[in-house]
Image (cartoon, rainbow, N blue to C red):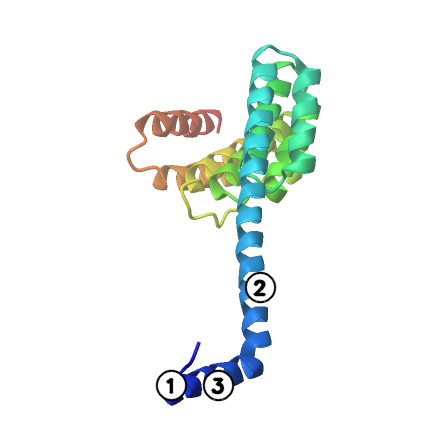
Amino acid sequence: MAYDLEEQEQLDNLKAFWDKYGNTILTAVTVVALAVAAWRGWGWYQQRQAGAAAALYQELREAASAKDIERMKQAAGTIFGEHSGSVYAPLAALGAAKAYLQAGDAKAAKAPLRWAVDHASDPGLRQTARLRLAAILLDEKAYDEALSLLPANETGSFAALFADRRGDILLAQGKTDDARKAYESALKALPGEPSLQRLIRLKLDSIAGGA
């Protein structure tokens, strides 16, 4: 097929361009294709892992409901071991601790709660674990350890609950004045919570009555 001079010049320019940049272009296209494939593969892997974690969490819930502690323990162990970064791991920790407590095994309940305190990325779940673990330690008379879980400088939505629990621990230690201050702090942080306010006022009244 014959080309006129202009077409031939364009073809020659294209050939020269490809000779100079062809390998670079092919490499760039390959890198982009591999990146897209890797991204899609990672998304698929994450979805598969999330599905597996969800199934294990459901297994844990069903086992806890059936009071099958051994099956629940196995499900929890797999979640913590293989899906520790998933949203289901701290939920599993709280669920397992609750099941242990209902079974009368407070000692076993401490381990998943400690895990949630150390690893939960969601602040609400982490603070809930702190409160529940502090309650167990209070029953065990491990007062200093319990207090260490409930910082007095907490200013979030758990501030009142932390202060109330600190009051319980301090009162158990016989530190009446400190307990009173903690309960008063809890009341100040509880606008719009009449039921809990009434409970804390009862605690304050009992301190006043025992003074």
What percent of the width, then of the height, locates residue 72?
Answer: 65, 20
Tell me if I can see residue 189 in this picture. Answer: yes
Q: Which mark is residue 195?
A: none
Task: Classify 10 Å Cα crowding around label 1: few (below 14), some (14-19), many (20 and above).
Answer: few
Which residue sits at x=65%, y=12%? 68
Residue 21 higher or lower than 37, as above or below:
below
Q: Secondary structure at mark 1?
A: loop
Tell me if I can see residue 176 in this picture. Answer: no
Say which amino acid is labelled 2. Answer: Thr
Q: Earlier in the sequence, mark 1 or mark 3?
A: 1
Say which amino acid is labelled 1. Answer: Asp
The residue tagged 3 is 12
The residue tagged 1 is 4
Q: Quadrant of the N terminus?
A: bottom left
Q: From mark 2 to mark 3, how far is it between C-alphas? A: 26 Å
What percent of the width, then of the height, locates residue 21?
Answer: 55, 80
Say which amino acid is labelled 3. Answer: Asp
Q: From mark 2 to mark 1, how far is it between C-alphas? A: 35 Å
Q: Earlier in the sequence, mark 2 or mark 3?
A: 3
Which residue is at the front of the view, 190 or 54?
Answer: 54
The residue tagged 2 is 30
Residue 28 higher or lower than 102, as above or below:
below
Where, by quadrant of the figure, is residue 192 drawn? top left
Q: Secondary structure at mark 2?
A: helix
Q: Nearer the viewer, mark 2 or mark 3?
A: 3
Which residue sits at x=58%, y=42%? 45
Q: Earlier in the sequence, mark 2 or mark 1?
A: 1
Q: Nearer the viewer, mark 1 or mark 3?
A: 1
Which residue is at the front of the view, 107 or 151?
Answer: 107
